[in-house]
Amino acid sequence: MKKLTRRQFAVAAALACSVVSWPALAQTPAKPKVALVMKSLANEFFLNMETGAREHQKAHASQYDLIANGIKDEQDTANQIKMVEQMIVSKVSALVIAPADSKALVPVVKKAIDAGIIVVNIDNKLDDAALKEKGIAVPFVGPDNRRGAKLAGDYLGKQLKQGDKVAIIEGVSTTVNAQQRTLGFQDAMKQAGANVVSVQSGQWEIDQGNKVAAAILNAHPDIKAILAGNDNMALGAVAAIRASGKAGRVLLVGYDNINAIKPMLNDGRVLATVDQFASQQAVFGIETALKALADKKPQNTLGGTVETKVALVTK
């Protein structure tokens, strides 16, 4: 075997290095990985949200990857915190979150931001004071829940007389969207001259909504209407109204416009609901996160609100 001269060896080594380094130069940057963390996937609203997000990712598969997950019920805050911690470990590029609790999720959101993850808040707004205390800014992409609830309340108010008794079934009371919807209902009832005799939490769930509605109907047999903070609780209230023998005599409104409520709108068991376009909420949040990543914007420049639409839905 012929030996290489020193000069020939040096040339061969240089060529080898250039061949080895060429693929590295040709590599394309990795796609951003976006995590969508929702509330209860037992709620049709969040299933619709997930479907919309997955359809968006499929149509933009070259732009980003998606991890989507949700908790077992609306109150499973501890598990949602664990999900966010898992996304931090997985080193996602962005987190789009519908928090189960407006305050309890703030510390782990800060942890995600400290890890360099872009965070966008959807559906239920994180508590402003809690964010300020942690020194972080998180953009909120979602509807004006107070205005949306007032739309349903105003429609109901047209069916009521001065002094009529009504009750409100609220969502999880520590969530900003539940609080805002209750305020919207109260705004409308005050304007209509109705008397709100009870505000109780149905925890966003069908069964709890049913129990609360049954208790309200028993305590106030002359009640004229119930305003439910979401359609799940409205479904529970429908069953309670029927069981009390007051079908057709107690009016009911909800919020979310899920498919399960539509037959009840058509036959009058539910007077109205509010569409906040679940399938698009996560999409708007994802697009906000992707734009921040593309523009290389730091989290502390991303505060504020991107308001999404709401619409009254009747028969």
Image: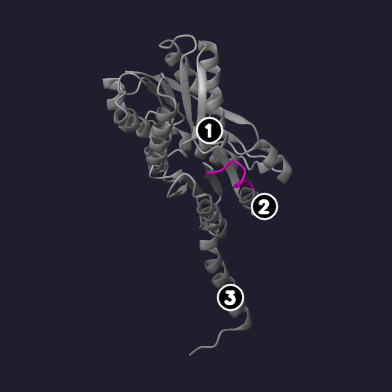
Tag 1: amino acid: Ala
Residue type for callout 3: Ala
The spot of residue 299 in percent (x, y) is 66, 43
Q: Of label 3 and label 2, which has the lower sequence position?
A: 3
Q: Residue furthest bottom?
A: 1
The residue tagged 2 is 114
Of residue 279 and residue 182, the one placed in the foreground of this image is 182
Res. 207 visible in picture: yes
Question: Dot 1: few (<14), some (14–19), or many (≥20) neighbours within 10 Å?
Answer: many
- Name the N-terminal-most of marks 3 and 1: 3
**Quick one: SS at disc 3?**
helix
Residue 238, compared with residue 156, is above or below; it is below
Mark 2: secondary structure: helix
Query: Who is closer to the viewer here, 69 or 8?
Result: 69
Mark 1 vs mark 2: give the one in front: 1
Residue 178: assigned label: 1
**Mark 1–mark 2 distance (CA, rounded to whole Å):** 29 Å
Segment tinted magenta in the rendering: 100-106
Q: Quick check: 66 above or below 202?
A: below
Residue 97 image label: none
Estimate the spatial distance between the alpha carbons at disc 3 and disc 2, rounded to whole Å: 44 Å
Q: Position of residue 185 (x, y in %)?
A: 51, 22
Residue under label 3, please give it.
13
- Res. 177 image quadrant: top right
Residue at 51% x, 62% y: name it: 23
Residue 49 visible in the picture:
no
